[in-house]
Amino acid sequence: MASEKVIHVSDAEFEGSVLQNDLPCLVDFWAPWCGPCKAIGPVIDELADEFDGKVQIAKMNVDDNPATPGKYGIRAIPTLILFKGGEVVDQITGAVGKGQLSDLIKKVS
């Protein structure tokens, strides 16, 4: 079951929801047809629950929103980018484990 704490952002909402967010923000760039994206979906939901109030977790469908992934040079999915204060802090590409994503988030939380 998807966490209600994960926000879904579009190209139009990206700046306000991610770059101007007071919290650090981890964005999962994904697509519905991507197997590895589906595999890490439950992990993303768990992290949103665990880090609620410390980090905002967001998802962006790259098929529906091509401008933002293009701006950040995303060529493979899933790609997760961690933002803080509107700047890229770190990036991971591929279906990685919860521990690795948790460690990434702990850099800014």
Image: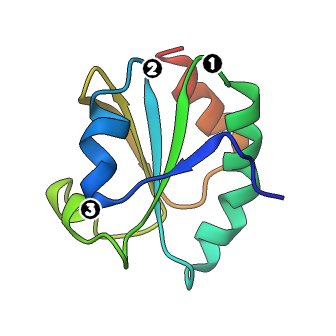
Relative to 89, 107 lies left or right? right
Q: Are marks 2 and 1 in contact (CB under 8 Å)?
A: yes
Question: Residue 90: x percent and y percent?
Answer: 36, 34
Q: Residues within 10 Å of mark 1 (few under 14, many from 20)?
A: few
**How far is mark 2 from mark 1, CA to CA?**
8 Å
Q: Residues within 10 Å of mark 3 (few under 14, many from 20)?
A: many
Relative to 73, 48 lies left or right? right
Residue furthest to the bottom in view is 33
Front position among marks 3 and 1: 1
**How far is mark 3 from mark 2, CA to CA?**
21 Å
Residue nearest the observer in this picture, 107 or 50: 50
Tell me the quadrant of the picture where the C terminus can be found. Answer: top right
Identified by mark 2, the residue type is: Leu
Residue 108 is marked as none
Question: Residue 104: x percent and y percent?
Answer: 52, 29
Identified by mark 1, the residue type is: Gly
Reading the image, the residue beneath label 3 is 69
In the rendered image of this protein, does residue 21 appear above or below residue 58?
A: above
Q: Residues within 10 Å of mark 2 (few under 14, many from 20)?
A: many
Reading the image, the residue beneath label 2 is 23
Reading the image, the residue beneath label 1 is 53
Question: Residue 84: x percent and y percent?
Answer: 34, 23
Q: Which mark is first along the chain, 1 or 3? A: 1
Question: Residue 72: x percent and y percent?
Answer: 21, 53
